[in-house]
Amino acid sequence: MRIAVVGSGYVGLVAGACFAELGHEVIVVDNDAAKVAALKSGETPIHEKFLPELLARHGGRSLSFTEDLAEAVRQSVAIFIAVGTPPTDDGEADLSYVESVARSIASCIDSYKVVVEKSTVPVYTSDWIRKIMLLNGAPAELFDVASNPEFLREGTAVTDFLYPDRIVLGADTERCAEVLRTAYAPLVSGEYYKCVNAVPRPDNSRSLPQLIRTSAKSAELIKHASNAFLAMKISFINAVASICESVGADVQQVCEGIGSDSRIGPRFLSPGVGYGGSCFPKDLTAFRAVARDCGYEFRLLDEVIRINESQRLRFLRKVRKALWTLKGKRLAVLGLAFKGGTDDIRESPAVSILTSLLREGCEIVTYDPAAMDRAAEVLNGSVTYAKSAYEAANRADALLILTDWEEFSALDLDRVHAALRYPIVIDGRNLYDPEQMADHGLIYYSVGRPDVAPRTRVQRPTLNAA
Ligand code: NAD
C-alpha cells in the first residue's frame, strides 16, 4: 500500500519506518528542509532503539523523504498526519499545524484518500479537518477522515509500534476502515511476526494486537483518556509516596501490595520526580480544556497536574535536607532526558530541577547517555557536561539521579563512592535498594522510602574516579 506520513518527528519517523518494515511504500514529508536533507543522507535525527536499523534497511528503497507534500499526497492512498500539537498559552492544543496540512492536502487531492489523524488531537478534530478540506475545494467523495491514535512511548517506540497492545481505528465509513485495516494487516494477522528479520519481540507483549474499530470521535477520546489515566496513576502513587515519607513506610512495598491486584496492575506505579515529556503535560491540559468546552469541569485532572508539579518541589526540598545550603555546592546530575531511552528533553523534570538548582547557585556537572546535545541548546553553557556518570561524580558534594536510564541503575557503587567528595546520593527515580546503598557506605535519599545512612565504611578503591 502507498502511504504518506506528514511530520518526521518522534511519531512520524517511527511510523514511516515501521510501515515500510511492514511492506508498504512510504513517503515521509516534513517542511523542515534540514531534517529532510539529514534523513535523505542516511542520518537518524533522534535517539530511538532499532530506528537506525530500519532506516538503513528501507531508506532509499520503500521509504523516502521529501518536502513536497503535494507529490506525496498524489502518490498515496492513506495520509497520516503526525505533526506537532503543542499547547497554547491557555493549555489548549494548538491545531494550526494540523489545519495547515489539511488545507494543503485539499488543494492537491485527485483521487480517493484517507486522511488519518496520527497526532494527538482533541475530540471534534476529525470534523474540523473535514470542514477545512471541503472549504478548500476537496470534493466530498474523494476523501474520508479517520483517527488512528498513536500509543508508542519514546525509548521503546519501534517495538511499541510493531508489537502494540491494541490498534484503534476510528473510522466513520467502511471504505476508510478497510484502508486502515490493510495498513496494519501484517500485525493483526501475525504475518510480520513470522519474518526472520522481524524486530525482536519485547517481553510481555501480546501475541497478536487487538484491533478496536470505533467512531472517529471515540478514537480521539481514547487517546486523551488513556494519557490522562496513566498520568493519574503516576500522580496517585506519588501522593501515596508522600504519605509513606511522613509515616516511615516504604512506597515500593506499597506498590508491590497494590500492583499485584490484577484490577490495578504494577505498571506506571512509579514514584519519582513526576511525569514529563512532550505528551502527558500537554495532553492533560488539552483534555481538561476539551472537557470544559463540553461543559464538564474535570477537576480530577487539576489535582493530577498539581501533584505532579509538587513532586519537583519535594525533590528540591530533599536536596536541601541532604546538603543544607545549596549556594556553591557542586552537584553531579545524572539524566537530562524526560525518561530513559530517549534524547527528548521536552518538559523534562530533570531539566526543570537542574534549572532550579542553578538558580540556587549550585555548580552542575551533568551526564546523560543521549540527551546532552539537545540539553546544551537550552542550557546555554551554564553547566558542565561529563563523559560518564563517574566523571560527573568526581569531587561532587552529592550525586542526583533524575532520569531512569538503565545505565544509571547499574553503577559501580564503590567507584561512585570513591569519586564523590561526600558519599551522598539523592535518587529521584528509586533506582536502588536503600539497603544496598547503605552497604556501600552511601547516604541515600529516595522517594517514598526511609533515608538510609552508611552501614559500613567501604574502603575507597584507588582507581581513577573518572
Ligand atoms: P515532533 O515535534 O517530534 O515532530 C513533528 C514534526 O512535524 C516536525 O519534524 C515538524 O517539522 C513537522 N511539521 C510541522 N508542520 C509541518 C507541516 N506543515 N508539514 C510537514 N511537516 C510538518 O512531534 P512528535 O513528538 O512526533 O509528536 C507528533 C504528534 O504525535 C503530537 O500530536 C504528539 O502529541 C503525538 N504523539 C507523540 C508521542 C511521543 O511520544 N512523542 C506519542 C504519541 C503521540
Image (spheres, rainbow, N blue to C red):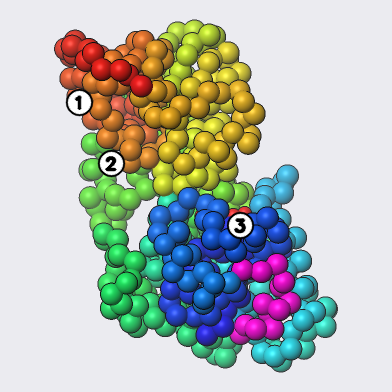
Examine the image and state in which quarter residue 250 appears: top left
Q: Which residue is mark 2?
A: 255
Q: Which mark is residue 38?
A: 3
Is ligand 1 within 8 Å of the beta carbon of the residue shown at mark 1?
A: no
Magenta-drawn segment: 65-77
Instruction: Please tell me in which quadrant of the rendered image residue 437 appears.
Output: top left
Tell me how many marks there are: 3
- Kind of residue at disc 1: Gln
Can you identify the residue that label 1 sits on?
A: 436
Dot 2 or dot 1: first in sequence order is 2
Residue 381 in percent (x, y) is at 62, 25
Q: Nearer the viewer, residue 65 or 247?
A: 65
Q: Nearer the viewer, mark 2 or mark 1?
A: 1
142 left or right of 326 in image: right
Residue 332 screen position, x and y as percent: 43, 21
Quadrant into which the C terminus falls: top left
Q: Residue furthest front?
A: 41
Residue appearing at x 74%, y 89% in the figure: 110
Question: Mark 1 packing: few (<14 Cα in 10 Å), some, or many (20+)?
Answer: some
- Can you tell which of label 3 and label 1 is closer to the viewer? 3
Q: In 3D space, how far apart are the residues under numbered discs 2 and 1 (Cα atoms)? A: 19 Å
Mark 2 to mark 3: distance in Å?
Answer: 44 Å
